[in-house]
Amino acid sequence: MAKTRGFEIVSKYQNQDLNLPQRQTLASAGYDLAAAEDIIIPSIWQLNFVRIFRMIRNGHQLYEKDYELAEQLLQPVLVPTGIKAYMPEDEVLILANRSSNVVKRHLNLPNGIGVIDSDYYNNENNEGAIFVAILNYGVRPMRIKKGDRIAQGIFVKYLKTDDDQAIGRKRVNGFGSTNR
């Protein structure tokens, strides 16, 4: 039987005792994705960009270097899962936050959802390794341990328009790789 959709461990994490994502109940739509290694997600409130917000609030002149510093500091942490996903061409893996992340851990996916396209699998630049972008809006750093569930992946079939014509670019990366 040919494989249709599923998960595999990427080469970098082979033999590192990772588990493939699983659904927790019969009615669960999402497969729980876990962190592949220990990582600390800093609180956004402890980053130096807060100085910029104080300057804005107090009506101070901001310069380009101030904006660049704030944008550089306020980046999500990319948490490696150590896995990749394969699926038919007309499907996508949606990465969604876990409700416990928001309520108990103050962690959020800054883009709302992540989108893993079918052609991301085994791409030549990073093998299709899935990372979860996370921001910590809590007041203290959050420690994520290897094996902690950090997001859920949901396979979804998508539709194309009647006049769809793919541009035909070859995927070479992730996180905005098809931007021009």
Image (cartoon, grey):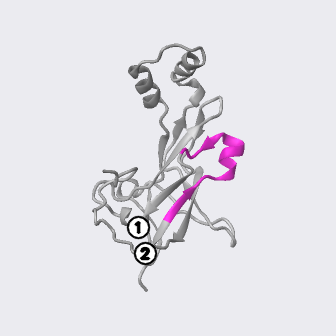
The quarter of the displayed image where residue 64 is located: top left
Residue depicted at x 48% and y 58%: 115
Image position of 54 with respect to 161: above or below: above
Give the camera-side residue of 72 and 32. 72
Q: Is residue 138 left or right of residue 120?
A: right
**Residue at the front extreme of this rendering:** 163
Image position of 96 with respect to 57: above or below: below
User: CA–CA distance between discs 1 and 2?
Assistant: 7 Å
Residue depicted at x 54% and y 63%: 21
Task: Write down the region rendered in magenta.
Answer: 93-110
Counting other residues with Cα less than 10 Å from the Cα at mark 2, is it few (<14), some (14-19), or many (20 or more)? some
The residue where tag 1 is placed is: 118
- Residue contact between numbered discs 1 and 2, judged by CB atoms under 8 Å: yes
* Residue 120 position in % (x across, y down): 37, 62
Marked residue nearer the N-terminal end (1 or 2): 2
Q: Is residue 74 magenta?
A: no
Counting other residues with Cα less than 10 Å from the Cα at mark 1, is it few (<14), some (14-19), or many (20 or more)? some
Image quadrant where one finds the N terminus: bottom left
Residue type pointed to by label 2: Pro
Give the camera-side residue of 49 and 153. 49
Q: How many marks?
A: 2
The residue where tag 2 is placed is: 88
Image position of 139 with respect to 104: above or below: above
* Residue 131 position in % (x across, y down): 46, 51
Residue depicted at x 45% and y 60%: 116
- Kindly state the secondary structure of the residue where label 1 is placed: helix
Residue type pointed to by label 1: Ser
